[in-house]
C-alpha cells in the first residue's frame, strides 16, 4: 500500500467507527485504540498535506485556523418566525391557515424552539460540504471547519432517498453541561464567565481555531430539510428519514391534529423542557404537508406555514433574606440563598443556589438585596444579578464562614479551586450521609428502597455510619424503628445483597472519590482492573491514563492514603462487593457489517452460535434477539423455528445461509 492508500484506508476505518458510534450507538473500538489510529492519520496528514481529504475524521478534532470566514449566499434564505404568546394568538394563526387551505384537512408538527445558533448544512453527493451561519438571512459565514467538530453531525450519508444535493437546517448549541464546565473554569481562573449558553454557542462557532471549537463539545439538532428536489411528502417523513440516517433530531417533536392538541403539547413541555441539554424558549408549530406549506407561502420575513410560541418569562425579582451554607458529600460548601417566596414560571421559589464564594463576590451579594432569579436548564433557580438601584446604603456584605457550618472544623480552599471544603470527611454528618446516598444511587450500587429519610434515621440511630455498615445490616437492626414492615425490611436487605453483583466500575464511582465521576471511574477500571492495582498505581501511572489529570490523580492517591477509607475497602471486600473487573476488548477483524443487524436462528455447520455472534460483532455488526421490520438479516441454520421463518417472510427480511454470511465478511 502506498501512503495515499494507507491514509484512505485509515479514513475509511475511522469514519466507519465514528458512524457506528454516533449514528448507530455502537462502540466498536476502545477510545484509546481509536485515538491511536487518529493520531496515526494526523501524523500522515501533517507529513503529506497534499493528500489531505475533506472527509478526514481529523476534522472532528479541528486544527484549522480561519482568519476571516468567507461569506456565502444562502440557496434558500434563512427566515425568522412570527411570535405568539397565548392561545388567542395561536387560534388566529390557525384561522388564517384554515382560510388559505379552504377548509381542507391539515396537521401540525410541534417542535421545541431551541435557543442556540441557526445553522445550515449543505450536502452534495452524500458529503457535508458546507456549514453556514444565518448571517443576515441572505448571506452567512462559511464555518464548515467549526461545524465539522459537531461529532453527532454526519459528515457523509449513505441514503438512497436523499437527492444529490440538499440542505439541512438546525440549531447549533453548547450543551448546558459544557457551558457550566467552561464557566466554572473561567471563574476559577478569575476570568469573566460567559453570559449564557446561546452567546457562548454563537461565540464558539465564530472562533478562528477549530481545535478550540472541538474542545467545547458543540452539538446540534436538525429540524428542517430543504432542496430543489424534495423526496418527502411531509415534514414528518423528512424528520423520520433524517433521524434514520443518524442525524441528531430531537425526539421531542409531536404530530398534532388541531390547536387543542398543540396547546396540550405546549403544556406538556412547559416544565419538562428544562431537563433537555439546552435552553428552549418556546415551541415552533409547522404545517406538516409540504404541498400545503408551499400553498401557504411566505411573507418577506417569515413563512406563513409556521409560527413560534414563546413561554412566559422566566425571570423574577425578589428579596434575599439570608444565606445558609450547605455541606455536600465531598465536603464542598455551597451558599444557598433563602428568598422571599416568589412565583416564577409555574412554581414558588424560596431558595436559590449561589454556587461558591467567587459567585457571591461577583454578585456582591448583601443582606436585604433585591435579586433577579432565573430558571435555566436546572431545576434549582440561580441568582443572576442584583438590582443595584434598589440597594440601600445600610445593606451589609454576606461573609463566607471560616468553619464548617455542620461540624465546626476549619474550612479549606485549595489554590485554584472555586470551592471551600470541610476536610473532616469521616466525622462531618452531612458528608457521611451524602456519601451513603451517593453510594446507593442507581448509577452506583443501585440499592433500592432506601431513601434520604431512612439514611438520616440509620445515621441518627448509629446503625449506618459509613457505606460498609450497610453490609452488616440485619433484620434485627430494624426492631423499634418506626415505619418499617417486614416486607420493606426484606426489600432493603435483598437490595443490599443484590448490590454485591454490581460491576466494579460502578462500585468505584460509588466510593465517591472527589473528581471521580462515572466516566473517570470507567477509565480507571479499564486501565487498572482491580482496587489493589489502582491503589498501588503511582502518580505517573495515573496521569498516563487518558483523561486523568493531576487533579484526579492527587485525589485518588489522597483517598487511598486515609486509614478510614482502607478500612471501608477491607470491609466491602469481606462483604463480597465487586472490587475487580475483567474487561476484554473486542478486536475488530473487519468493518463490512457496520450498521447491520442480525438474528441468528437454527443450527450451523461451521459455527457454534456464540462463535457466530462473536464473528458478527468482530466485523462491526449487531446481534439482536427478535425479528422486527428494522432487522437487516436473518442467518438461517438447520432446524430453524417455524414462527421465526413466518415472521421474517411477513416482514420481507433478507434471509441468508451460513455460507452467504461468510461471503459478506470479505
Ligand atoms: S424552523 C423559516 N424549527 O428559530 C424558519 N426554527 O425564528 C424555519 N429555531 O433562528 C425555522 N428551533 O434557528 C425552526 N424547531 C425549530 C427551531 C427553530 C429554533 C430557531 C431558528 C431561527 C429561529 C426562527
Image (spheres, helix red, strand yellow):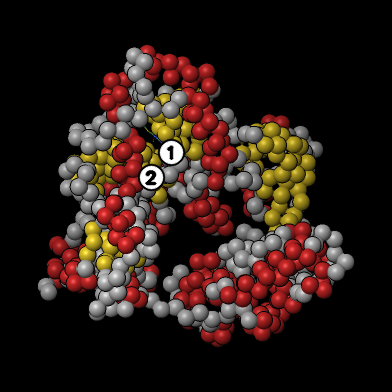
Q: Is residue 405 above or below residue 102?
A: below
Q: Is residue 466 left or right of residue 645?
A: right
Asked if the beta carbon under badge 1 is closer than 8 A to the nearest atom of ligand 1, the reply is yes
Q: Position of residue 638 (x, y in %)?
A: 26, 72
Displayed quadrant of residue 400 = bottom right
Can you give x and y, in whole percent of width and height, for residue 154 in the image?
30, 52
Quarter occupied by residue 42: bottom left
Residue 619 visible at all: no
- On screen, 5 above or below 611? above
Q: Residue at x 49, y 71 (%)?
A: 522
Q: Position of residue 380 (x, y in %)?
A: 64, 46
Q: Is residue 289 visible?
A: yes
Left or right: 435 with respect to 288?
A: right
Where disc 2 sits, the SS reads loop
Disc 1 secondary structure class:
loop
Q: CA distance from mark 2 to mark 1?
A: 9 Å
Q: Are marks 2 and 1 in contact (CB under 8 Å)?
A: yes
Which is more foreground, mark 2 or mark 1?
A: 1
Residue at image point 57% right, 58% down: 188
Question: Which residue is pictured at 82% across the width and 59% down the height?
Answer: 483
Please give the residue where the numbered disc 1 appears in the rendered image: 253
Residue neighbourhood size for the residue with mark 2, other residues' Cα within 10 Å, grouped as few (<14), some (14–19), many (≥20)? some
In the foreground, 286 or 125 = 286
Q: Quadrant of residue 404?
A: bottom right
> Where does label 2 land, which residue?
249
Q: Would residue 180 appear left or right of 373 to someone viewing this image?
A: left
Q: Quadrant of the N terminus?
A: bottom left
Q: Given the current orientation, which residue lies at the most extreme right position?
A: 480
In the picture, the disc for residue 497 is none
Amino acid at each position: 500500500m502506498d501512503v495515499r492508500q494507507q491514509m484512505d484506508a485509515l479514513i475509511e476505518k475511522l469514519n466507519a467507527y465514528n458512524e457506528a458510534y454516533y449514528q448507530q450507538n455502537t462502540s466498536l473500538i476502545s477510545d484509546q485504540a481509536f485515538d491511536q489510529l487518529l493520531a496515526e492519520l494526523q501524523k500522515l496528514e501533517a507529513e503529506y498535506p497534499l493528500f489531505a481529504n475533506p472527509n478526514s475524521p481529523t476534522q472532528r478534532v479541528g486544527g484549522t485556523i480561519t482568519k476571516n470566514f468567507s461569506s456565502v449566499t444562502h440557496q434558500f434564505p434563512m427566515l425568522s418566525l412570527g411570535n405568539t404568546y397565548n392561545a388567542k394568538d395561536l387560534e388566529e394563526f390557525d384561522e388564517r391557515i384554515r382560510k388559505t387551505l379552504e377548509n381542507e384537512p391539515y396537521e401540525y408538527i410541534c417542535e421545541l424552539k431551541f435557543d442556540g445558533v441557526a445553522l445550515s448544512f449543505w450536502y452534495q453527493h452524500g458529503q457535508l460540504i458546507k456549514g453556514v451561519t444565518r448571517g443576515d438571512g441572505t448571506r452567512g459565514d462559511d464555518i464548515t471547519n467549526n461545524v465539522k467538530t459537531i461529532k453527532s453531525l454526519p459528515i457523509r450519508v449513505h441514503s438512497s432517498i436523499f437527492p444529490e444535493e440538499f440542505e439541512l437546517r438546525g440549531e447549533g448549541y453548547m450543551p448546558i453541561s459544557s457551558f457550566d464546565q467552561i464557566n466554572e473554569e473561567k471563574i476559577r481562573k478569575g476570568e469573566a464567565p460567559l453570559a449564557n449558553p446561546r452567546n457562548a454557542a454563537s461565540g464558539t462557532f465564530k472562533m478562528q481555531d477549530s481545535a478550540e471549537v472541538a474542545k467545547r463539545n458543540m452539538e446540534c439538532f436538525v429540524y428542517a430539510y430543504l432542496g430543489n428536489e424534495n423526496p418527502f411528502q411531509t415534514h414528518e417523513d423528512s424528520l423520520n428519514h433524517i433521524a434514520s440516517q443518524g442525524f441528531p433530531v430531537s425526539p421531542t417533536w409531536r404530530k398534532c391534529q388541531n390547536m387543542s392538541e398543540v396547546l396540550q403539547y405546549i403544556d406538556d413541555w412547559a416544565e419538562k423542557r428544562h431537563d433537555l441539554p439546552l435552553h428552549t424558549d418556546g415551541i415552533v408549530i409547522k404545517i406538516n404537508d409540504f404541498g400545503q406549506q408551499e400553498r401557504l407561502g411566505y411573507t418577506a420575513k417569515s413563512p406563513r406555514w409556521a409560527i413560534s410560541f414563546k413561554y412566559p418569562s422566566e425571570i423574577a425579582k425578589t428579596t434575599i433574606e439570608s444565606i445558609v451554607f450547605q455541606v455536600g458529600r465531598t465536603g464542598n460548601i455551597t451558599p444557598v440563598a433563602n428568598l422571599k417566596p416568589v412565583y416564577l414560571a409555574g412554581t414558588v421559589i424560596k431558595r436559590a443556589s449561589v454556587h461558591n464564594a467567587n459567585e457571591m463576590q461577583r454578585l456582591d451579594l448583601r443582606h436585604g438585596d433585591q435579586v433577579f432569579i432565573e430558571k435555566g436548564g436546572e431545576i434549582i433557580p440561580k441568582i443572576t444579578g442584583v438590582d443595584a438601584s434598589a440597594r440601600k446604603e445600610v445593606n451589609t456584605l454576606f461573609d463566607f464562614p471560616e468553619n464548617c457550618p455542620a461540624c465546626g472544623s476549619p474550612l479549606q480552599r485549595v489554590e485554584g479551586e472555586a470551592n471551600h471544603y470541610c476536610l473532616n470527611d469521616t466525622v462531618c454528618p452531612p458528608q457521611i450521609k451524602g456519601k451513603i446516598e451517593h453510594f446507593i444511587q442507581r448509577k452506583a450500587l443501585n440499592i433500592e428502597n432506601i431513601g434520604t429519610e431512612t439514611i438520616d434515621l440509620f445515621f441518627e440511630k448509629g446503625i449506618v455510619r459509613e457505606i460498609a455498615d450497610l453490609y452488616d445490616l440485619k433484620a434485627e437492626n430494624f426492631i423499634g424503628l418506626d415505619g418499617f414492615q417486614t416486607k420493606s425490611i426484606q426489600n432493603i436487605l435483598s437490595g443490599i445483597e443484590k448490590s454485591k453483583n454490581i460491576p466494579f466500575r460502578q462500585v468505584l464511582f460509588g466510593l465517591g472519590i472527589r473528581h471521580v465521576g462515572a466516566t473517570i471511574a470507567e477509565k480507571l477500571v479499564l486501565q487498572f482492573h482491580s482496587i489493589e492495582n489502582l491503589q498501588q498505581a503511582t502518580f505517573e501511572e495515573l496521569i498516563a491514563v487518558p483523561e486523568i489529570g493531576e487533579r484526579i490523580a492527587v485525589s485518588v492517591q489522597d483517598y487511598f492514603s486515609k486509614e478510614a477509607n482502607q478500612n471501608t475497602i477491607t470491609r466491602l471486600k469481606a462483604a463480597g462487593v465487586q472490587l475487580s473487573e475483567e474487561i476484554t476488548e473486542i478486536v475488530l477483524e473487519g468493518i463490512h457489517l457496520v450498521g447491520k443487524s442480525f438474528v441468528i436462528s437454527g443450527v450451523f455447520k461451521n459455527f457454534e452460535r456464540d462463535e457466530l455472534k462473536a464473528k458478527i460483532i468482530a466485523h462491526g455488526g449487531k446481534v439482536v434477539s427478535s425479528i422486527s421490520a428494522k432487522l437487516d438479516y436473518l442467518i438461517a441454520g438447520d432446524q430453524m423455528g417455524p414462527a421465526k421463518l413466518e415472521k421474517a417472510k411477513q416482514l420481507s427480511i433478507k434471509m441468508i445461509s451460513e455460507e452467504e454470511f461468510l461471503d459478506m465478511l470479505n
